[in-house]
Image (cartoon, helix red, strand yellow):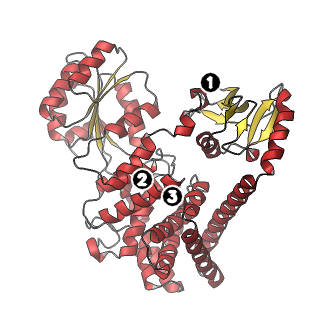
Amino acid sequence: MTRLETAANGPSPTNGSLDGALLQTRPRVLVIDDEPAVVKAIHKVLSKAGYRVVGLVDPLKVEDAIVGLDLNLVITDLKMPRRDGLETLSTIRSLDPKLPVVVLTGFGTIDTAVQAMRLGAVEFLTKPLSTKELLRAVRNHMNYDGPLPEEIQQLLEYESTPDLDAASQPPENALSAEEVPTEEGVPAGFEGIDFADLLPGQFFSFAVFLQIFNKKTQRSYLKRVIRKNTVLTSGMFKALAKREVEKLFIHRQDKEEFQEYTQAVKASPVFQQKRHHDQRNTALYKKTLSVTEKVLSTPSDSGYMAAARDLVRELVSGIRVDPMTYHEVVDIGASGSSVFHHSANVCLLSINLGVFMGLESDRIAELGMGALFHDVGMLWIRSDILQKTDRLTNEDWREIRKHCQLGYDLMRQQGGLTEAELKMILEHQERTDGSGYPRGLKGADISFPARLISVIDRFDSMTSHRSYRYAFTPAEAMKRIFIEERTDHNKQIIQKFAECLSRNKGEA
């Protein structure tokens, strides 16, 4: 860490997250603003999102920062004393023409925006700025010298292109991060209905509303999600399902029409098939999670070990028949953050990738077992370390780095796993450039299944919400993993996994 960076951020040699060590070289953002409070606020948001942030309150020192630091993006205020944002932008462009610069100001006009863009700014943002808008700009413009594989570009396109079905609904239907669905009480003049009774693609002759509690304003209100005489789109249906909506509301005078609708819908084969499909997937994930929790909590129980192998065989068979099973089943438990949720997700992801790559069933089953047990050693790490929400100390990291060897030794002693499955436990934190642990293996010295699990382990960790950072979207996670891979050994695996995820996106 340079002296400039230390002065800006304070000594922070270690990221304060359990999966921080997974990112070997986090992208670095320079924030220039003469108001320390603004720098601090942006630093907090971007650090939580996994970026290294350097703050600068004196724009006259920008030359030292550009020359002395390896930067991926600059955010600069427009109105600053001694040197304004446009002059700062010109200086940055003269020193590093390829470095993207986002201009931020509370005094924006069309003329200044045009001038900033002409000078090479990639975007012009106006204060006050929401967290979502800031992260969108940073993720969109983060510099990367090199082409991304087609598979990752495709994932990015899926996420950057609005769902056409959802976009056809009026903008009022979108829920902000502050808006939380609530079922407390029935609003006057309304009747409650079950979300489970709705079917996408159906025509609604009545309006449907969602009851909202706004965390920011501390107010409750109704929000229309289906307009009268329109179709419930698959995009809106998925958005409501993702927010775990269970109860919606209709005008009391529309109750008879709704009853006619539900009678017709429930009699349709499509509805019965969908309900059966949803119930099967929910039961499958609950079973996966239940077996995972039991077998990891009591790995010495031979009965649980047999149950784990039976589960993996069932998953392999099911995903071979219906590849979308993975995509829907893992979405059910994506919000969980425990070791058990993570292990279940990595198991499902690994089996799906193995099927997609055309591996033999026995190898896929081994991959699934190794994935299921890959973090078993974490259960022997002190809970106070695993539950920390602030920065981990070097001593904490030394303890966490023991989990691979602990898990390997434990399972080798207990028996029941093959040598290939044991290697996945031992080697899933190794890195192809030798920077991983516990043995610092390089390249092909790391077993192929362990390298598969390494990528998937990072992906699931990055796309899961943590108290100390925001979750990455799948495309952003894959982009980061690809960019930060230092050797070619894993890049083909990363591309293949991105292709697998794109296939699931395309079929969803």
Residue 485 point in image, percent of width and height: 29, 59
Relative to 398, residue 105 above or below? above
Q: Secondary structure at mark 3?
A: helix
- Residue beneath disc 1: 217
Relative to 303, residue 189 above or below? above
Residue 420 point in image, percent of width and height: 42, 81
Amino acid type at circle 2 is Leu
Amino acid type at circle 1 is Thr
- Residue beneath disc 3: 386
Q: Earlier in the sequence, mark 2 or mark 3?
A: 3
Answer whether residue 493 is visible to the viewer in this image.
yes
Q: Is residue 275 left or right of residue 240?
A: right
- Residue at (40% x, 59% y) in the render: 499
Label 3 to label 1, Cα distance in Å? 34 Å
Q: Is residue 124 left or right of residue 411?
A: left
Where residue 487 sits, quadrant-wise, is bottom left
- Residue beneath disc 2: 392
